[in-house]
Image (cartoon, grey):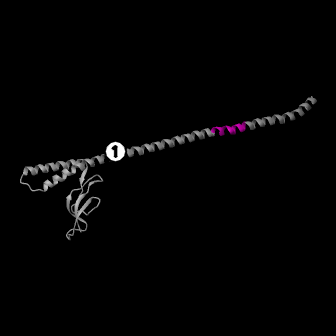
Amino acid sequence: MSDKKKKHGTAEPKQAPEAEVKEEAAQQEQEALAREAPKAETPKADDSAEKLAAAEDKYLRLAAEYDNYRKRTAKEKESIWVDAKVQAVTALLPVYDNLERALKQETADAAFKKGVEMTMKGLQDALTKLGVEVIPAMGETFDPNRHNAVMHVEDESAGENTVVEVFQQGFTCGDKVIRCAMVKVAN
């Protein structure tokens, strides 16, 4: 037995370090694989997160572009509508001017005068329904964006740059001036 113990004793120390080395190597190999495994999964997770972020960014940009397109087309549509109204009203303004002149003329025929007044009232109502307004001019301060001065007069009773006479009415449609009022300005 002693021989066996010796053999085994000497053999055991030789085998034990080899076994320990093998076990350590296997353990280190498993730890290395464990360390590499999350690294291999992390880029996949990062890739999917990056892809998700890129897709979300693309979606937000597309939504913003669509919103801008929708607003721009609505604004263009409104602009086309206003331009069409302006064109129609511009075609009717000579009729308005003629009716205004007819109302200023003296006539003995009361029925004729009443008919012209009713026609003028109908035209004014139609223009109001379209959103067309008369530019206030008489007694107002001269505004070159809304008034067209065709005469100038020195009048001490009137204020500086005051409209003292209106020759032709001006009209607006919303913020857009259809026709400037033709006026006489004092001082």
Q: Position of residue 9 (x, y in %)?
A: 89, 33
Judge whether 114 appears above or below 36 on screen: below
- Is 88 part of what is drawn in magenta? no
With 80 as the anchor, is 152 left or right in this view? left
> Between residues 135 and 97, which one lies in front from this camera angle?
97
With 3 as the anchor, is 137 left or right in this view? left
| Residue sitting at x 13%, y 56% | 104
Q: Residue furthest bottom?
A: 156
Q: Position of residue 101 (x, y in %)?
A: 15, 55
Magenta segment boundaries in residue numbering:
30-41
Q: Quadrant of residue 108?
A: bottom left
> Between residues 71 and 103, which one lies in front from this camera angle?
103
Say which quadrant the C terminus sits in: bottom left
Which residue carries the number 1 mark? 77
What is the secondary structure assignment of the residue under circle 1? helix
Judge whether 5 appears above or below 64 on screen: above
With 135 as the anchor, is 67 left or right in this view? right
Residue type at the position of mark 1: Lys
